[in-house]
């Protein structure tokens, strides 16, 4: 039995840490950690339901908790400008190096929005994509966030932001954000957008040649039913945006023409034409589309990570066991990080994908040797209304190196959000019981 498996077993025998707990609801955690000045800083961000009165009132806010290796803690809600009532979709990133632009700075991107009156209570404009900044590893956050994009009214709204920070060569510290301008007319004309900051989202100075807070926003690909962007950068500094296109049911990837997503001087697009990774199988149909256990949404959104050791991009998602199946499986692909972007399906062991049982919401990480860490929710050994966090180790080509191990206790089917957090050896997930909803965190070496 290898060391990783032994450590996983040891972790499973410990009680995971409760990051946040609320009967109204907490969901969709992301986690990041960084060693800075001989202190390890770990921050978890998530969505907290701050008001829950069905049919009367409903508000959500992006929240965070912080812990460092000296035992210091802090927590709170991200501040918002006065014109917004809600926030959601938090994602964390940082420049974890001592080099480049704003070394050691941590960032959180999210969506600011408003909410329709009862009984609809749906998110409505004005909406904004914003990036908050921390200079102390996530112990506190500055201001109301730097605006990336905003829509005051009309037939488009903003959704699903993602953020990444380069740690490669001359682009180290560049901040990249992607998001969707959603077409609400039903015409399938949503825009997948991208914007970068070359100065650590600092305010621009009236000095020649100093970069602005944000370079201009650009469209990544053609209009369509695009959603769920992820951003990775490779060893050379090229930028990749991975996303789903719902009309064609395809996972796609677009690569920047130049390192750092520099704007071409000839006026051509910042990104090369998007290429298809694979076509996914839909979960369910009709009113049960993208739903398992009656209440858990399993939208096929990509989870992506760059594998430094192999120069490949790993992309995972949830899909039907078969077309329109009522149960879900995980899918994993390896994509070469170059212009050709060759995609290879990674067959997952039956120890991970169990026939007739739901596996869903994957998160991916890699280690220095190029091995793959896969975290996901699994109903194996439980009834359909329950699931448990599991984590497995694969080789760079997908061979199972350590059998999946359960973390924490089984959870009740509930609103779990569309992402879970995995960073290095820290994992964070959503777990509900009959009386409470929690964000759990555990560490595996």
Image: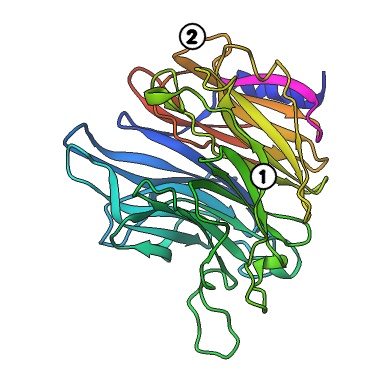
Q: Can you see residue 9? A: no
Q: Give x and y (percent) for residue 150.
A: 37, 63
Q: Would you place residue 173 above or below residue 430 in this image?
A: below
Q: Which residue is mark 1?
A: 276
Q: Residue at x 56, y 14 (%)?
A: 357
Q: Would you place residue 346 above or below residue 94 in this image?
A: above
Instruction: Place residue 125 in its image quadrant.
Output: bottom left
Q: Which residues are magenta?
A: 396-408
SS for callout 2: loop
Q: Residue at x 50, y 46 (%)?
A: 227
SS for callout 1: strand
Q: Which mark is residue 383?
A: 2
The quadrant of the rendering that contains the C terminus is top right
Residue in front for this viewpoint, 310 or 390: 310
Most frequent secondary structure within the magenta stretch:
strand
19 to the left or right of 200: left
Mark 2 or 1: in front is 1
Q: Would you place residue 25 above or below residue 125 in this image?
A: above
Q: Earlier in the sequence, mark 2 or mark 1?
A: 1
Instruction: Place residue 130 in its image quadrant.
Output: bottom left
Q: Residue at x 62, y 68 (%)?
A: 269
394 to the left or right of 304: right
Residue in front for this viewpoint, 326 or 106: 326
- Neighbour class for label 2 at 10 Å: few (<14), some, many (≥20)? few
């Amino acid at each position: 039995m290898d060391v990783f498996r032994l450590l996983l077993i040891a972790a499973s025998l410990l009680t995971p840490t409760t990051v946040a707990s609320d009967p109204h609801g907490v969901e969709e955690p992301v986690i990041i950690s960084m060693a800075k000045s001989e202190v390890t800083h770990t921050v978890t961000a998530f969505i907290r339901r701050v008001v829950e009165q069905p049919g009367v009132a409903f508000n959500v806010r992006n929240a965070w908790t912080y812990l460092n290796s000296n035992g210091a803690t802090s927590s709170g809600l991200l501040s918002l400008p006065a014109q917004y009532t809600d926030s959601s979709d938090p994602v964390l990133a940082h420049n974890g190096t001592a080099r480049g632009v704003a070394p050691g700075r941590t960032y959180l991107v999210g969506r600011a929005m408003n909410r329709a009156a009862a009984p609809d209570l749906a998110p409505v404009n004005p909406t904004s994509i914003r990036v908050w900044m921390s200079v102390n590893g996530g112990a506190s956050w500055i201001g109301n966030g730097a605006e990336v994009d905003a829509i005051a009214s009309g037939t488009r709204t903003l959704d699903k932001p993602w953020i990444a920070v380069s740690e490669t060569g001359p682009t180290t510290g560049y901040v990249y954000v992607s998001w969707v301008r959603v077409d609400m007319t039903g015409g399938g004309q949503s825009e997948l957008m991208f914007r970068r900051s070359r100065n650590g989202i600092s305010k621009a100075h009236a000095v020649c040649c100093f970069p602005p807070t944000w370079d201009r926003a650009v469209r990544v690909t053609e209009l369509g039913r695009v959603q769920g962007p992820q951003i990775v950068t490779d060893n050379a500094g090229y930028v990749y945006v991975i996303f789903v296109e719902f009309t064609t049911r395809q996972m796609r990837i677009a690569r920047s023409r130049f390192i750092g997503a520099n704007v071409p001087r000839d006026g051509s697009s910042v990104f090369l034409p998007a290429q298809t990774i694979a076509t996914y199988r839909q979960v369910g149909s009709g009113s049960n589309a993208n739903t398992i256990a009656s209440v858990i949404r399993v939208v096929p959104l990509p989870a992506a990570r760059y594998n430094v050791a192999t120069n490949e991009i790993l992309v995972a998602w949830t899909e039907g066991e078969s077309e329109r199946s009522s149960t879900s499986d995980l899918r994993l692909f390896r994509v070469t990080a170059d212009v050709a972007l060759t995609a290879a399906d990674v067959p997952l062991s039956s120890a991970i994908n169990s026939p007739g049982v739901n596996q869903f919401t994957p998160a991916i990480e890699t280690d220095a040797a190029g091995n793959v860490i896969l975290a996901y929710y699994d109903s194996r050994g439980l009834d359909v209304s329950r699931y448990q966090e599991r984590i497995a180790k694969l080789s760079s080509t997908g061979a199972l190196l350590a059998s999946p191990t359960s973390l924490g206790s089984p959870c009740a089917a509930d609103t779990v959000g569309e992402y879970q957090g995995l960073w290095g050896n820290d994992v964070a997930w959503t777990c509900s019981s009959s009386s409470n909803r929690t964000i759990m965190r555990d560490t595996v070496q």
